[in-house]
Amino acid sequence: MSRRTRLLALWLSAPILAFVVLGGYVGRTSAQEDSYRPLRIFEDVVSLILNSYVEEVDIDRVMTGAMRGLAEGLDAESTFLTQDEVVALERDAPLPEGQTGVTLTRQYYLRVLSARDGSTAAVAGLRPGDYIRAIDGESTRNMSIFEGNRLLRGSVGSTVTLTVIRGNAAEPQEVVLERTPAGSSIVRSRLAAADIGYLRLMAFDSGIADDIVSEVDSLTGAGARQLIIDLRGTADGNFTHGLEAARLFVSSGTLAIRQRRGAPQDLTVAQAGDGSIGLPTVILIGAGTSGAAELFASALATNGRAELIGGRTFGRVAEQRLIKLVDGTGLWLYWAKYLTATGEPLHRQGLEPSVAVAEPSFVLGAEPPDVDPVLEKALEQLAVDRAT
């Protein structure tokens, strides 16, 4: 290997080295040797690519792809950010007002984590797990969630075309979505039966606790004595607001445990005055239930305040932050995660329902089934609980 090649390989691998150090590879000397051995292999790979590939190599493109792969090998949400993405993130500049209602995750391509109720994405039938292979013809194979979110936003009334694959479908379908303003309502309620209230929480934004109190008061005034809380497809919101909402239902005990690497656990516990809502409750969950919604559901379930019905949740219950690298690029990494009140992992594990019910499947573009088996099972379960 020439001196020039070695220097170039070292320069290119500097961000990787920074990532490794931040990841906590410091330890015993022998452990360090084992940990850094892959970096020597990486140097060899860079040399072989530079000197042996049949065509001239675009080093920036290759290295960006390599570093994206390194970060995304951790989980679906961690990513390597370009200089432009770091600048945009630090500026926190507002995106255009028009949106589709899609919350994104990644698995090989961008995927739908949820489609917010009433949004154009929900109306078009997009569901958790749908692959978005392209946005306006641009492949999402190497696209970050940040870039995907930027492309989905635009002026109100404009459109965006998604190339979507559902399940094992052989051919992708193009779905055209109009960008609309975000809806203001995040809570809806109705009577699901004569004495059973139904509460739909679409996001855990600021003011969610007050909205819940108001809607539950209306439901009890209308005769509700039991409560169904629907968190299916609820993926937006803040962990703090999720815990604020949980306090309404849990009068004593631990709500959640926050864990940072190498730091003491931080417990969130119920306080005097918590637990003002005492209705027997079940919670509907599924693959699109994520983040603050999982934390809320976990707090109620582990404290015996609610039974979980539906499917396993997504398992995205951790906080992320930006770590800048020397060349202006950055890493967007999880740095703190939440555990259940009993110390069980939530992040990357999700919540398992006590009563499992599969969501009905249907072809993209077809009308969804009229019957909601998860809701029907919840009504049945509450009837059994009432009888016993």
Image: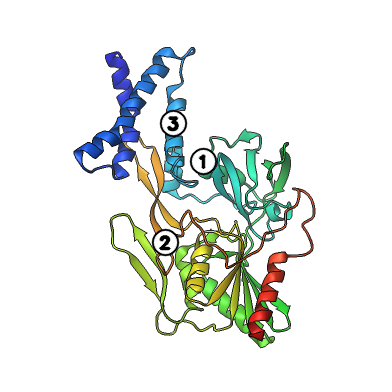
Q: Disc 1 and disc 3: Cα gap in Å?
A: 13 Å
- Where on the picture, by quarter, is residue 251? bottom left
Dot 2 lies on which element? strand
Q: Position of residue 11 (x, y in %)?
A: 31, 26
Task: Give the class, few, some or many, for how many residues have Cα within 10 Å of label 1's Cα (few <14, many ≥20).
Answer: many
Give me the residue at 52% from left, 62% from top. 351
Badge 1 or badge 2: first in the primary sequence: 1
Mark sitting on residue 338: 2
Kindly identify which residue carries mark 3. 66
Foreground of the two, 341 or 9? 341
Marks 1 and 3, the one that precedes in the sequence: 3
The answer to whether one can see residue 240 in this image is: yes
Q: Residue at x 72, y 41 (%)?
A: 169
Give above or below for 135 relative to 121. Answer: above
Q: Tell me the mark number nearer the camera, choosing from 1 and 3.
A: 3
Three-letter residue code for mark 1? Ser
